[in-house]
Amino acid sequence: QVQLVESGGGLVQPGGSLRLSCAASGFTAFSFTNYRMDWYRQAPGKERELVAGFPSVDGSPNYAESVKGRFTISRDNAKQMVYLRMNSLKPEDTAVYYCYARYQRLEYWGQGTQVTVSS
């Protein structure tokens, strides 16, 4: 069974930085490299939204307009890890951040990690 475990969240002041990590495991039927990997977030009272992701395994990443130029997604296929580097954080970035994996009809979510941006 595929498992995604996020880490790296916490409380940070506006303008600060965090790096989220997603450790993926349990890929038996299909390799990790087959999966597109995304980061989503959900703020209180709002719908879950795509923050950053790789639309294809070997493609360039895409970003929500609200985070372009501040966030960077990366993946390490050898380690089965996905990262989200977040710079210049704003209070509106406060949310639970989720790692997401999808390949064909298979999709998996992590449990989420809380990011709070506040002074």
Image (tube, grey):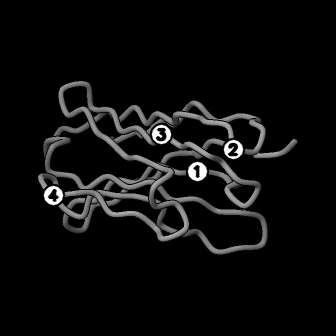
Compute the Cα span from label 3 to label 2: 12 Å
Q: Nearer the viewer, residue 68 or 45?
A: 68
Type of the residue with mark 2: Val
Q: Are marks 4 and 3 in contact (CB under 8 Å)?
A: no
Compute the Cα span from label 4 to label 1: 22 Å
Instruction: Tell me which numbered mark, 2 or 4, is placed earlier along the sequence.
Output: 4
Q: Name the image quarter holding residue 59.
A: bottom left
- The residue identified by callout 2 is 115
Residue 85: give its label.
Answer: 3
Type of the residue with mark 4: Gly
Compared with residue 87, is residue 96 higher up or lower down, i.e. above or below? below
Compute the Cα span from label 4 to label 3: 18 Å
Residue 11 falls left or right of residue 69: right
Type of the residue with mark 3: Arg
Of badges 3 and 1, nearer the viewer stands 3
Q: Are marks 2 and 1 in contact (CB under 8 Å)?
A: yes
Instruction: Tell me which numbered mark, 3 or 1, is placed earlier along the sequence.
Output: 3
Residue 62, given in percent of the width and then of the height, sits at 33, 63
- The residue identified by callout 4 is 59
